[in-house]
Image (spheres, coloured by chain):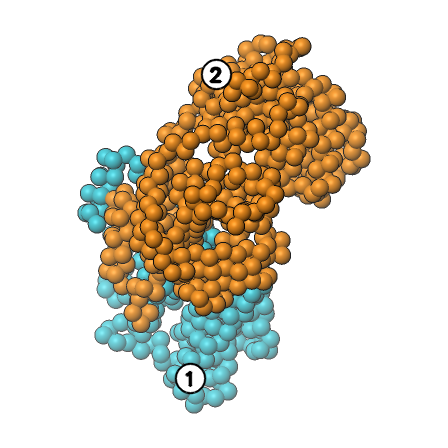
Chain colours: A orange, B cyan
Amino acid sequence: MSSVSKTMNVESTGPVLSLSGVSKMFPGVRALHEARLTLHKGQTTALIGENGAGKSTLVKILTGIYTPDAGTIEVNGKAATFRSPRDAWAAGIVAIHQETVMFDELSIAENIFMGHAPTAGLGRLDWRLMRDRTRVLLDALESNLDPETPVKRLGVAQKHMVEIARALSHDARVVIMDEPTAALSAHEIEELYAIVERLKKDGRSILFISHKFDEIFRVADRWTCLRDGEHVGEGFIRDTNERQLVSLMVGRSIDQVFPKTDNAPGEVVLEVNDLSHPTEFDGISFSLRKGEILGLYGLVGAGRSEAMQCLFGLTKASRGEVLIDGKAVELTSPAVAVAAGISYVPEDRQVQGAVLPLGVRENMTLASLARYASSGILSTARELNETRRLGERLAVKAANWDQPLNELSGGNQQKVVIGKWLATHPRILILDEPTKGIDIGSKAAVHEFMSELAREGLAIILISSELPEVMGMSDFIMVMREGRILARWDRAKATPEAIVRAASGLAEVAAA
Amino acid sequence: MTYRREILLAVIILAIVVGVGLRAPAFVTPSSLIGVVTDTSLLFMLTLAQMAVLLTRGIDLSVAANLALTGMVVALASRAAPGIPIAAIIVLAVGFGAALGLINAVLIAGLGIPPIVVTLGTLAVYRGMIFVIAHGAWLTSKDMSPAFLAVPKAEFLGLSSLIWIAALVSVAAWVFLNHTSAGRALYAVGGNPVAARYCGIDLARQQLRVYTISGAVAGLCGYLWVSRYGIAYSDIAIGYELTVIAACVIGGVSIAGGVGSVPGALLGALFLGVIVNALPVINVSPFWQMAISGAVILAAVIVNSRSERQTGKLILPEARRKAANAAGGA
């Protein structure tokens, strides 16, 4: 990192905001370790790092949602503590969120002044003052939106504009933008860049979080990089290049040990040719053999889950074909997919997986009920046998197999949901972010289990946003970006740099 | 599965019966108690059907109107063709009721209109149709054939045929809900619609099935109601859908879907049956009866919500052990 620190200049003015030595632990996970960050008046700082590097945690500390375990925050050189989002507002720090949170039925003016509306005595709202001040704020952003327009009629970019106006209504000196362009069209992105320029000219500081290198180089003056919760470098954008930033983001040996064993893959079970959807993904082609694990990497919103949900029959493809054992299948519904041997363990297992009022047995057998019925009548004994087999294999901790799921801990609920899909005796298992939000110990158990299933001949598709996991567990890796497969490698040929470059849209050639 | 709530409800019902019996010993004679159950037979069946609907996060407000319209249709059929065999009457009642239920089902499952709106609309339509098809006439026992009227009066082993029919429906409901894939699917779509969809369980198909069943049961009860009381007109069983829903709620069926048991629903219905029959015996006015059943519904809802709040997740090892011991080990 010495080459990086050499490029640092001495600041002419003191920082507007500086964090140092900030650490935050969650049970079993170290989210931030002695991280630091400085923001300067009238400048944009890009915060970069892989998924899970600690960027979101840092933002939540800055906005008073999390309290750090250690470290100091200084605003204009004075120490500050943020106990609540209100404290952060009072200090002039406002975040524009990834998905804008708004009251759709209310007007722009009401949204901007929600929670701090001007009053005209006796608690009455001063509607005229609210409108006038909204007009002034929108004028400052060179927007001609009408303050009385309901927010539901606005486009995504216009909602961003309202969010920014709301930030300015708090007299924000620091504006945090978390992937602000994720949902914007090219034209809208240009408008956002113009707003950033105006905010800078106004003397405000901007923290810009993005995975897209082209926009980092377009809007940022400085950069700060996090990796595994630690600060790994900072400097001026004009002194760096993409290659240097990418290697800083991923620059590590994969020190975690993954239990992946190299087993000789069998014959091809799944072949997907040119699977496409009108708006979500296009030209998805790959083939998967028995005992093989395919790692599907990409940024959040790259279309990985959508493509796999289509393969599972949840959405309809506009063209393309799916072959299982060389025979074309029409996957028109999840029931058909399950019958064809495909199972999909969704990402949000709480919402998409568990039926909380039902018992462990009833959840475990829900996707495979036909297996326990003879002439339409379910056999509780057969259901219990399968539940016991899977429950013991997955080490589900429950008082008894008929205990309602809402009495189980989150980790055990997840195990039951995974068990439910194994009970269908799938030949192709799609796991969507199987280790997201679980501690290191449980992660290792999931990885061990995946390897075991692969050894038994299951073909597995692993959707993951964690680079070490994808690299450690997969036989081959595909990277998706904006709904298309950009690159694919065998396990041996993939490098972290190449994967991140592809996912960020920097790879020119897709390796075969 | 533990039946704590059901046992509590059974104890309360028993306490009411004993309490009333102390004041009016005539109430606790076997024939009087059997009379209470006979009186409640239709409510048992309607409550079970409504429970199946509530499980899917739906509601069927049109059951009483369906019952009255189907009752009028079979009464008219009996008047027009007195010789028609009773089996044909029953098939007609079940089929006609199922057809009315299917109208709800198609509007709900096919067009995606909220169940409360659809069944509120069909409630009014079905009620109105009674007046239209009978030209405002009342049909009395004089218009019905003796065979038509004989069914509810028939007895077997000292119990009314109504009890036997309700028992058959209860057993069928028990098997359907606990031991078939289709029954399990109702709990799944109500407990977590998204998870159910991922399992290949189609909400629309469950709705189609469950509203048709609800209609069929209402139709059967329509014939039994009209033949038992020997009268059919546009206002029979008016507002009875609320009694049915109340019985479900008292029996522990969740309005939010996914929770409910056959014994619970039966006990909920029995509770209301006992209240309605017992209070006049001890000279409580009908208006008090309404207030009392209302208070009981509120009490049942409060008890349910409190018991849900108190049972937390079992994360502590000692709590898991305790629960395992309490359940007798699985």
Disc 2 element: strand
User: Which residue is rendered at x = 35% and y = 36% of the image?
Assistant: A257
Disc 1 element: helix
Is residue A489 shown left or right of residue A419? right
Numbered tag placed on residue A21 in the rendering: 2
Task: Classify residue A202 by image quadrant.
Answer: top right
Where is A51 relative to B11, above or below? Answer: above
User: Which residue is rendered at x = 25% and y = 53% of the image?
Assistant: A389
Around disc 1, counting alpha carbons within 10 Å, would you say few (fewer than 14), some (14 to 19), or many (20 or more)? few
Is residue B118 shown left or right of residue B263? right
Q: On what subunit does the disc labeled 1 rest?
A: B
* Nearest to the observer: residue A18 or residue B273: A18
Residue A62 image position (x, y, % from top left):
55, 22
Residue B192 can be seen in this image: no
Residue B62 image position (x, y, % from top left):
51, 64
Numbered tag placed on residue B141 in the rendering: none
Where is A176 relative to A328, above or below? Answer: above
Residue A72 can be seen in this image: yes
Numbered tag placed on residue B88 in the rendering: 1
Task: Classify residue B87 by image quadrant.
Answer: bottom left
Q: Amino acid at mark 2?
A: Gly
